[in-house]
Image: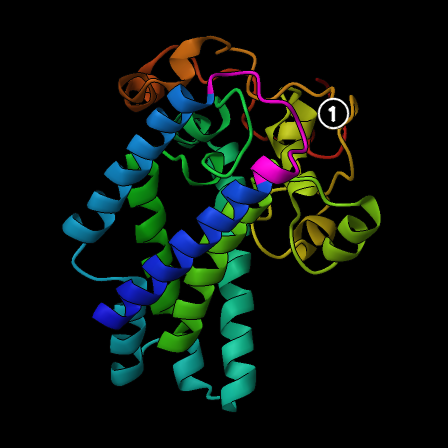
Amino acid sequence: MNREYMLRIGFFFGIFVLVALWEVIAARRKLGSPKARRWAGNLGIIFLNTLLVYWLLPVTAVGLAALSQARGWGLLNNFPLPDGPALISGVITLDLAIYLQHVMFHAVPILWRLHRVHHVDLDFDVTTGLRFHPIEIALSMLIKLAVVAFLGPSPTAVLIFEIILNGTSMFNHGNIKIPQSLDRAFRLFVVTPDMHRVHHSILVRETNSNFGFNLPWWDRLFGTYRSQPAAGHEGMTIGISEFRDRRSWSLPWMLALPFIGEAGSYPFSGRTGAGGPP
């Protein structure tokens, strides 16, 4: 287990620093909020979530995968494949589960209340990719554990998926400039910052699109893909319309947000993902 933590922490800090430096060298957009104050709030909730996951939950997804493998739980443990295909299918199936979970957190109003903590950030950078309400983190972990128990992927597949998901979340939220030709090529295989930034638009029809975190295929397959924001990446407005003030980077306010006001107009009905009303 210590090896798992060390690998995940090493990749986390390595990718975080790489993307943060990339943002300094080649920023895609000019930030509109004080970076130090935003980062203080975003990093605060990230630290709180880290404590929640590692102190309160008795088992990790990798640990449950190892237990499932030993006990013969899950589909993949009862219909064995060669190691290579088993590893690849495990990673891809877990990514599909995360896509569906993300859609669910937009579709169910009470879950959207939790998830909007991620969307009320008035800017879009590497810290946005890790900014989630602790209750959403706990629910996401429980969903992931249920998926691992049901599917039975190998511990190696789960560990690789966890590292990739964490890394791509920081990458595709990066405020980084990638030439359009490279972006078009990259987004055939991975969700790019330009692809995911559309999902953080203030427009409902754009927010309810591009749900993928890692693989870009699910949005195309399920009709939730949107190539570009209507206002362009420099002109688009980040966030959601109900909350447009400096409270968005306050840690106490982020923790209270799910219990404030109405759910708003953003929950996904399936009609606005590809071009419904704003």
Q: Amino acid at mark 1?
A: Gly
| Res 254 quadrant in image | top left
The spot of residue 16 in percent (x, y) is 45, 48
Q: Quadrant of the N terminus?
A: bottom left
- Residue 248 in sight: yes
* Residue located 50% across and 46% down the image: 170
Q: Residues within 10 Å of mark 1 (few under 14, many from 20)?
A: some
Residue 270 in view in this figure: no
Does dot 1 land on a helix, a strand or a loop?
loop
Asked which quadrant contains residue 32, the reply is top right
Assess whether residue 257 is covered by the magenta stretch: no
In the rendered view, tell whether residue 179 sits above or below residue 29: below
Q: Residue furthest front?
A: 25
Residue 184 horizontal/vertical position (percent): 80, 51
Residue 118 vs residue 7, the one in the foreground: 7
Tell me residue 119's x, y (percent): 50, 27
Q: How many marks?
A: 1
Q: Is residue 262 left or right of residue 24?
A: left
33 part of magenta stretch: yes
Please state which of residues 39 and 206 is positioned toward the viewer in this rendering.
Answer: 39
Residue 63 lies, in percent from the top left, at 26, 70
Q: Residue furthest bottom?
A: 82
Q: Residue at x 81, y 44 (%)?
A: 180
Quick one: 92 or 24, which is closer to the camera?
A: 24
Residue identifier under label 1 = 276
Magenta residues span: 23-34
Please name the predominant secondary structure of the magenta segment in the image.
Answer: loop
Locate the C terminus and report the quarter of the image it occupies. top right
Q: Is residue 69 above or below residue 230?
A: below
Left/right placement of residue 179 relative to residue 259 reads right
